[in-house]
Image (cartoon, rainbow, N blue to C red):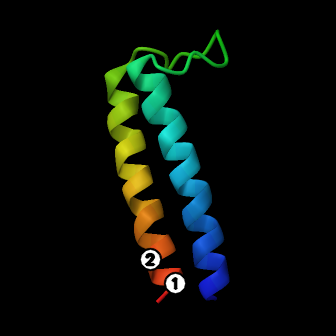
């Protein structure tokens, strides 16, 4: 169970960081993404990254 939480947490963190990068315009991949320079996606990414960190923390307890 703990290992599953850590893996899911890591995936959520990685996706959240990608969304933050795309939402702020720092990551322009893929070039045709509708998320580029849309700050709302940076906010969604921050929430998802925070959830990922919590899951990683719970998995390592």
Which quadrant of the rendered structure holds the N terminus? bottom right
| Number of marks drawn | 2
Viewer-side residue, 33 vs 29: 29
Q: Is residue 13 left or right of residue 54?
A: right
Which residue is at a point 40% across and 70% down the rendered structure image? 54
Which residue is at a point 49% across and 45% down the rendered structure image? 16
Please say if 22 is above or below 59.
Answer: above
User: x%, y% of residue 59?
Assistant: 53, 82
Please say if 43 is above or below 58.
Answer: above
Secondary structure state at the residue bearing disc 1: loop
User: x%, y% of residue 46?
Assistant: 36, 45
Looking at the image, do the residues carrying marks 2 and 1 touch, with CB atoms under 8 Å apart? yes
Please say if 36 is above or below 42.
Answer: above
| Residue 60 tag number | 1
Badge 2 crowding class, 10 Å Cα cut-off, few under 14, some 14 to 19, many 20 or more, is: some
Using the numbered discs, state the Cα–Cα distance from disc 2 to disc 1 in whole angstroms: 5 Å
Query: Residue beneath label 2, please?
Result: 57
Q: Is residue 46 left or right of residue 56?
A: left
Which residue is at a point 52% across and 84% down the rendered structure image? 60
Secondary structure state at the residue bearing disc 2: helix
User: x%, y% of residue 5?
Assistant: 58, 77
User: x%, y% of residue 53?
Assistant: 43, 64
Which residue is at a point 47% across and 61% down the rendered structure image? 52
């Amino acid at each position: 169970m703990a290992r599953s939480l850590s893996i899911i947490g890591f995936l959520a963190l990685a996706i959240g960081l990608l969304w933050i990068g795309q939402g702020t315009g720092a990551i322009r991949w893929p070039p045709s993404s509708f998320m580029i320079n849309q700050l709302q996606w940076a906010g969604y990414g921050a929430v998802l990254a925070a959830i990922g960190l919590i899951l990683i923390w719970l998995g390592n307890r």
